[in-house]
Amino acid sequence: MDNKEFNDIEAEKKEIRLLISNGISFTVDYVESKTVRIPRFSFCKLLKKKVTTNEPKQREFVIKEPTLYTLDRLSAEYIEMVVDEEKIREAPRQQARIYFQEHNKRMAKVVAIAVLGNEWDNADKLNELTEFFFRWLKNSSLVELVQVIDLTNNLADFINSIRLLSSARTTIPNRVEKAD
């Protein structure tokens, strides 16, 4: 590997570390409905009619590198998402709809856990944010957010550290019995 390739890889690693440490922000567009009671006639203020207005709004969120506590919870959610590749090959569109119906709420919950960080154990906050994402996130945004969450989980560095630690062991027990 030449020096330019090495520098490009190092620059990419630095950029990823910077993104992970600062977090990655995203906005969700939603509509807030307000009901207002308006007097029907100027001379009679008791007779009022209800008027509902829809006001478009945006809400910003930040996904930061999760702590081990949060990462453990995210992993528990990932494990519950079982996908059978054989069924997808047999009937891709039907199975995609089935999996969407089974896992759409869980995906919203994954995003909510990633946003809340260590506060995910507050059930009220988690449920409120899960419902918000379930209602207002678009599928295209969800795909991008899952990639962001995967990036901020920093699992590649975690696995590499496990490899380093396992190879640095100085005493490896000898097996007394050999498997036949």
Image (spheres, rainbow, N blue to C red):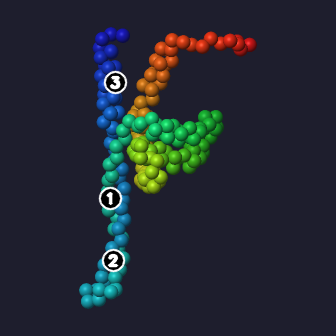
Q: Earlier in the sequence, mark 2 or mark 1?
A: 2
Q: How far, Cα to Cα, is label 2 from label 1?
A: 20 Å
Q: Is residue 154 above or below residue 107?
A: above
Q: Earlier in the sequence, mark 1 or mark 3?
A: 3
Q: Secondary structure at mark 3?
A: helix
Pick the front one: 33 or 111: 111
Q: Is residue 146 above or below residue 125?
A: above
Q: How far, Cα to Cα, is label 3 from label 2?
A: 57 Å
Query: Tag 2: residue type?
Result: Arg
Q: Position of residue 4 (x, y in %)?
A: 29, 14
Q: Earlier in the sequence, mark 3 or mark 2?
A: 3
At label 1, counting other C-alpha atoms closer than 10 Å, the crowd grade (few under 14, some 14-19, many 20 or more) is: few
Q: Is residue 67 above or below residue 57?
A: above
User: What residue is rendered at 30% in x and 36% in y?
Assistant: 22
User: What residue is rendered at 50% in x and 14% in y?
Assistant: 169
- Asked whether the residues under the numbered discs 2 and 1 touch, taking CB atoms below 8 Å apart as contact, a structural biologist would say no
Residue matched to label 2: 37
Q: Position of residue 96 (x, y in %)?
A: 56, 43
* Residue 135 visible here: no
Q: Nearer the viewer, mark 3 or mark 2?
A: 3
On residue 56, which mark appears? 1
Q: How far, Cα to Cα, is label 1 from label 3?
A: 38 Å
Quarter-of-image position of residue 91: top right
Q: Secondary structure at mark 1?
A: strand
